[in-house]
Amino acid sequence: MNRLRLAAALAFFIFALPPILAQPQTAAQSQSSQDHVITVSRGGEAFAKPDLGILLMTIRSSAPIAEEAVAENGRKAKAVESALAALGFVATGYKITSVVFGEAGGSRYGPNQPEITAYEASQFVYVFFEAADLGDVAHLTEKTAAVIEGLRKAGAVPGHVASPRMPQEQEGLIIYTVKDSEPYERQALKQAIGRARDAAQDVAAGMGVQITGLRNVTTGYLGGNYLPRSGLPQLEGLPYRFYSTKSDEVEIHANATVEYDFK
């Protein structure tokens, strides 16, 4: 087997393995292995200590008349604001999203003839717990219980957050995040690129060829425990990028693909 065929065989073998967060092999990658290019994907990760806890609550109202549903939800929202103020929360300590409005249900007499029996209005309530609260588990538990009870009396109900990838394992009333995730993103990406570079060098050594230069680096994946844009509308009203139900860490993952020319 000549070097060209050996390169193609080894590149195929590499992509057949299950590297951490590796990207699926594409036609372009398969072709590049035949053009004196070694292509390897690897993953990296970083673990951030959460500095913000978020309690998720929901306000929901239904009525046979649309205006009544919206008005009732507005009344509950004001009651929630009053309850939070009584508990010592300032305006920046919580967020109430805008109203989502829709049909609550009904029966159909035909495929295009729904009978609307009720309308529903809903809003998410985010209550923020800062790092000082997170450092004392007993205090956080007590404070959370007081908030839940106060908002329940105001008309809100607890809302659970579940990961679409592991809905049974990852859910909870409080979700944790890190306000500034950029340093951890860079750390995860740097690790992924380093692992891919080292793997490419190992491939070159195994093939008995010499790497002549770096052709391209692609970072194709960046994510955490939860992906707000992938089926988690409960979190879409928040500006943060990575979430976890673990109070001690937020995982941030990255994927990188490197391409090296060889001879």
Image (tube, rainbow, N blue to C red):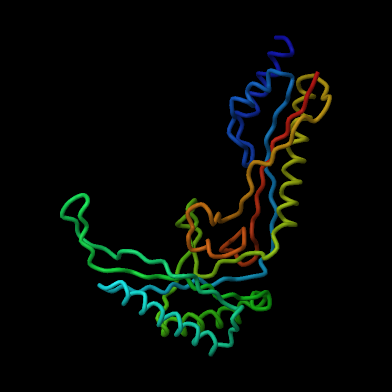
Q: Residue furthest front?
A: 67
Q: Is residue 70 left or right of residue 18?
A: left
Quadrant of the frame with the N terminus: top right
Total numbered circles: 0
Residue 52 placement: quadrant: bottom right
Q: Is residue 53 above or below residue 8?
A: below
Q: Nearer the viewer, residue 213 or 244?
A: 213
Q: Is residue 185 above or below residue 25?
A: below
Residue at image coords 70%, 16%: 6
Q: Is residue 206 above or below residue 4?
A: below
Residue 245 placement: quadrant: bottom right
Q: Is residue 182 left or right of residue 54?
A: right
Q: Nearer the viewer, residue 28 or 47?
A: 28
Picture coordinates of residue 171, whole percent (x, y): 49, 62
Picture coordinates of residue 148, whole percent (x, y): 48, 80
Q: Is residue 88 left or right of residue 179?
A: left
Q: Nearer the viewer, residue 108 or 38?
A: 108
Residue at image coords 61%, 78%: 92
Q: Residue furthest left?
A: 109
Picture coordinates of residue 86, whole percent (x, y): 53, 90
Residue at image coords 68%, 78%: 132
Residue 64 placement: quadrant: bottom left
Residue at image coords 64%, 56%: 251
Q: Is residue 246 left or right of residue 194?
A: left
Quadrant of the frame with the C terminus: top right
Q: Is residue 160 above or below residue 146?
A: above
Picture coordinates of residue 81, whole percent (x, y): 50, 83
Q: Residue furthest top?
A: 1
